[in-house]
Amino acid sequence: MADELKLIKKAQKGDVNAFEKIITEYQSVVYSISYRYADNAHDAADMAQEVFLKMFKTINSFRFESKLSTWIYRVATNTCLDIVKRQRRAASALPLGGFDDEDGNNFASEPADSRFMPDARLEEAETKDVVNRAISELSDEYRTVVILRDIRGLSYDEIAEIVDCSVGTVKSRISRARKNLREILLENRELFEKYFV
């Protein structure tokens, strides 16, 4: 912890090496959060890069009133939500079938080709895809608390600090988010049931 505080103070003074050490320490956490919002590895990597850029630009806003990890979760969550909102606005301007590049290649959203994946890995990837798709249908505030609690395993107090609300509100959102998630899975049972039979 003492070393982390020194790193933060150095990073706030513009020490790039200190900031890189912070990135190294938290890159898997940031990538994991980004992946839950992006739902694919390429976009998650881009999203994580944007989170780190935002962290670098705002490191001076860290006031040592909370843990660094809490601040990073807050920056990552807010940045990912901003990116998702931007993408929704951009997607609403695209034709439903995606778009074509100059060579006529269509960039519609397509599932990954699973023909070359071993069965166990394929089943695991499909299950994750089902859960990720269901989570992506939640509202932003519900998706955020599910990611922070059920996927990242943060405490109610930590989540309350990250999303800037009371612990009671966090518990209520998590309860409603889980209920909505169950409803989404039940409503789309025909899509999901082969994974859960």
Image (tube, helix red, strand yellow):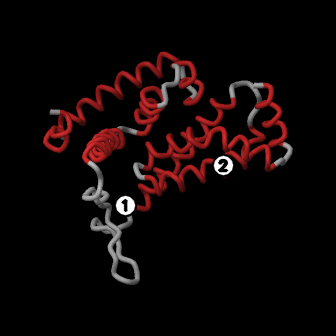
- The residue positioned 86% from the left and 44% from the top of the image is 13
Considering the image in quadrants, where does the C terminus appear? top left
Task: Write down the residue under mark 1.
Answer: 92
58 vs 92: above or below: above
Left or right? Give the position of 26 relative to 125: right
Q: In the image as oriented, which residue stretches furthest toward the bottom?
A: 103
Left or right? Give the position of 71 relative to 146: right
Considering the image in quadrants, where does the N terminus appear? top right
Q: Amino acid at mark 2?
A: Lys
Task: Write down the residue under mark 2.
Answer: 54
- The residue positioned 54% from the left and 39% from the top of the image is 77
**Residue 46, disc:** none
**Residue 121 falls in image quadrant:** top left
Q: Amino acid at mark 1?
A: Ser
Residue 35 placed where, x, y %?
A: 46, 46
Residue 89 placed where, x, y %?
A: 43, 58
Of the image marks 1 and 2, the number of the one nearer the N terminus: 2
At numbered mark 2, what does the secondary structure look like: helix, strand or loop? helix
